[in-house]
Amino acid sequence: MKQTIVFFRLACLLSFVFGLASCGIDMPKETVSSFETLTVDTTDIVLPVKFSAKMKGQADVTISPQVSGQLMKICVTEGQQVSRGQTLFVIDSRNAQHEVEAAEANLQAAQANLQAAQAQANSAKLEYESNKNLFDKKIVSSYMLENSLNNYKQAQAAVSQAKASITQAQSAVNRAKVNLGFCTLTSPVSGVIGEIPVFAGDMVSPGTHLTVVSGNRQMEAEFSVPESVLEQNYATNKFKNVEDALKLFPDVTFVMKNGTEYPYGGRITSATGIVNAATGTIACKATFPNPEGKLFSGIQGTVVLPASKRGVMVVPQAAVLRLQDKSLVYKVRPDSTATAVTVTTTDTGNGKDVIITSGLNVGDRIVTVGANNLEEGQKVLFPEESKSE
């Protein structure tokens, strides 16, 4: 029964098809799709020139102690935002306090010695003046006068020495107080605390790395520019020096490693002016504002510098076919047939177009859409021709 139904349906279908044919109804015809073409011309374009960069705080400061002692307290945590003058670390200050007290005691002793020396000098002066008066009256001998004069001079020398001792003692007090102040380490800039490799209770000394405070209000992207790029700019714009070149550079952007573009533009603010003999590059810095603290020291990314190109031939990437190490474009002959020509290209960086540097001339007509389906000598059907058929 099932086989009978199947044969019946098949017979109906064949009858329907033959019926359409006998009634004179045309079946759909296969048509050839037309190709899109472009007449090559010159234009101006802005190209993104990219440089690998590493971000650094404009005022990154390494925090190290200037005195030795036990680290008593760590007052901040990694990643914490701090203000200038905020306490970061506290070192055991007892020895430094004792040094201050000892220095102050020495200063007091020196001051007492000065008072005694001044009193002795005053007495010696009175004795000398008295003997001089008596000598003038021929009451005392010249020996007595000379002896009192020598005593007076010795007393004056003792006063000078006592004053010098006070100066030294005062310097010792000041130095001891400075050392005492070094026991409390404060932040020299406003910024973010980096890694803290020490712990409370550790013994530290001058040179011990405690942390880095990254002044992140302004960030600097450090990157290297090939010598050839700068030479080209100098030749094109006839800059007299690096400073003039930096002033005319456009704003740059910073792109994170994940492809996200930083929302604030930056300026190239410095270039060393010295070419690295090993790499053939010049070290540059671009400064970016960081009001929201999204940039951190050490992050890597790309500095993008917009470079203007004038009078270049720009074509869609779809028009260029890659064949091993060659790039081909199908050029349209006057008889509307296509012929493959070899070209050299430069990437525009926008993901859509390329610059033709050789192989084509202004006015040439090339196939843009459908070029990958073409064969040498194949006729290119333009839209108006396909409509007329």
Image (tube, rainbow, N blue to C red):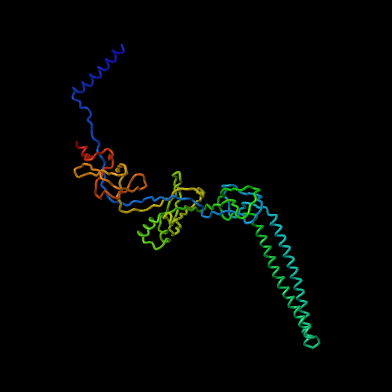
In the picture shown, does residue 98 fall above or below 348?
Answer: below
What residue is rendered at 19% in x and 43% in y? 335
Asked whether the viewer can see residue 292, the reply is no
Q: In front: 161, or 134?
A: 161
The answer to whether residue 247 is left or right of residue 105 is: left
Count of marks overlaid on the render: 0
Q: Position of residue 57 (x, y in %)?
A: 51, 53
What residue is rendered at 34% in x and 44% in y? 352
The answer to whether residue 60 is left or right of residue 278 is: right
Residue 105, picture quadrant: bottom right
Q: Position of residue 208 (x, y in %)?
A: 60, 52
In the picture shown, does residue 382 fall above or below 58?
Answer: above
Q: In front: 48, or 383?
A: 48
Q: In front: 143, or 347?
A: 143
Asked whether the viewer can see residue 187, the reply is yes
Q: In front: 371, or 287?
A: 371
Q: Position of residue 383 (x, y in %)?
A: 23, 39
Residue 11, picture quadrant: top left
